[in-house]
């Protein structure tokens, strides 16, 4: 009997041929790769569900969120504008599957990787100071992040 292995959603943090990984900020990518190696030693594979995004893709996500949530104000709790998105600048990554995101949430500060939003357990950004001081307090959601109001 042949065993069929299902592919884990997302791509690896080592996939330099994919713009969503290749266009991440180099420091973020280096920290993410270091964390991925440590996670792998514990049998956990970190996958990138979303990393760098084009402004056009971010705008599409935003329009869909406005439609889904009924207003720009509610959409802002989940999707930033292209002008404010850390994904567009290459400074954010969404990690999966859920158990890998949980691992990174627990161990990420060791690599300077921090969750930023309480409502997005998959979203991580580089905070180098976290290596010595721990991650900063979480914002409830992106609408509470002062960077979203520039």
Image (tube, rainbow, N blue to C red):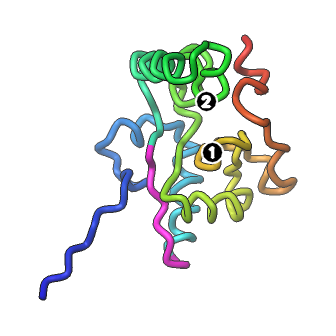
**Does residue 117 sit above or below 36 in this rendering?**
above
Question: Mark 1 falls on what kind of element?
Answer: strand
Q: To which residue does mark 2 refer?
A: 78
The furthest residue to the left: 1
Q: Residue at horizontal 64%, vertical 43%?
A: 120
Q: Position of residue 55 (x, y in %)?
A: 45, 17
Q: Position of residue 71 (x, y in %)?
A: 60, 13
Q: Position of residue 99 (x, y in %)?
A: 56, 65
The furthest residue to the bottom: 1
Q: Residue at horizontal 52%, vertical 41%?
A: 26
Asked whether residue 92 is drawn in magenta, I would say: no
Extent of the magenta region: 41-49
- Of 121 and 83, nearer the camera is 121
Q: To which residue does mark 1 refer?
A: 124
Gap in angstroms between the C-alphas marked 1 and 2: 14 Å
The image quarter containing residue 117 is top right
The image quarter containing residue 54 is top left
Q: Position of residue 27 (x, y in %)?
A: 58, 43
Mark 1 crowdedness (10 Å alpha carbons): few <14, some 14-19, many ≥20: many
**Does residue 115 sit above or below 59 in this rendering?**
below
**Residue 1 located left or right of residue 30:** left
- Of 26 and 11, nearer the camera is 11
Q: Residue at horizontal 52%, vertical 32%?
A: 90
């Amino acid at each position: 009997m042949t065993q069929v292995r299902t592919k884990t959603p997302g791509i690896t943090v080592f996939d330099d041929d994919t713009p969503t990984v290749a266009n991440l900020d180099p420091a973020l990518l280096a920290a993410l790769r270091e964390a991925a190696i440590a996670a792998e030693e514990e049998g956990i594979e970190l996958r990138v569900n979303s990393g760098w995004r084009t402004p056009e893709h971010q705008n599409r996500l935003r329009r869909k969120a406005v439609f889904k949530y009924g207003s720009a104000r509610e959409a802002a709790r989940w999707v930033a504008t292209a002008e404010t998105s850390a994904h567009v600048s290459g400074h954010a990554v969404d990690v999966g599957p859920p158990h890998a995101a949980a691992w990174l949430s627990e161990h990420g500060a060791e690599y300077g990787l921090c969750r930023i939003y309480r409502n997005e357990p998959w979203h991580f950004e580089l905070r180098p100071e976290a290596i010595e001081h721990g991650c900063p307090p979480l914002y409830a959601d992106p609408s509470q992040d002062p960077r979203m109001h520039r």
